Amino acid sequence: QVQLVESGGGLVQPGGSLRLSCAASGTISRFKFMGWYRQPPGKEREVVASIPNIGSTNYAESVKGRFTISRDNAKNTVYLQMNSLKPEDTAVYYCNGYAYYGVEYWGKGTLVTVSS
């Protein structure tokens, strides 16, 4: 059973930084794409950033220049470095993996709160 486990969320002041991690059980090379989504309070889930096994990263316009997604295949982990955080970045952040064999996996989420 493939599992994705997020960590690194918490409370941070506006302008601060956090790094989220998504650890996979087993190799992440099985995933054609991995990504981070978020769900702000009272809103729908939205894509934040994605990274393919081969190719370029993609970002939502709202986080371009502030967030960076990366993957470490040796550690089976995907990261989301978040800088210059704003109150509107407050959300539950979810890790997502889409496998080459057509199955999509989700983590349980980690809460990020940006507040003074």
Image: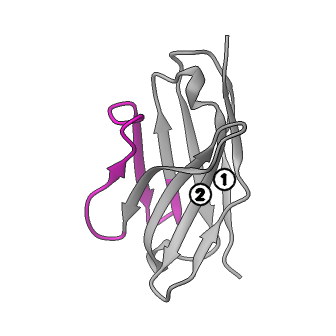
Q: Which residue is mark 1?
A: 6
Is 57 on the left-hand or right-hand side of 38? left
How is colour applied across the structure in the image? one colour
What is the crowding at mark 2: few (fewer than 14 residues within 10 Å), some, or many (at least 20)? many
What secondary structure do most residues of the magenta stretch adopt?
loop
The image shows residue 99 at horizontal and vertical percentages of 50, 79
The image shows residue 49 at horizontal and vertical percentages of 43, 50
- At x 63%, y 48%, the residue is 44
Q: Quadrant of the C terminus?
A: top right
The image shows residue 33 at horizontal and vertical percentages of 42, 69
Q: Quadrant of the N terminus?
A: bottom right
What residue span does the magenta drawing correspond to? 53-78
Disc 2 residue type (three-letter) = Cys
Q: Which residue is mark 2?
A: 95
Q: Earlier in the sequence, mark 1 or mark 2?
A: 1
SS at mark 1 in the image:
strand
How far, Cα to Cα, is label 1 from label 2? 7 Å
Residue 76 appears in the picture as rendered? yes
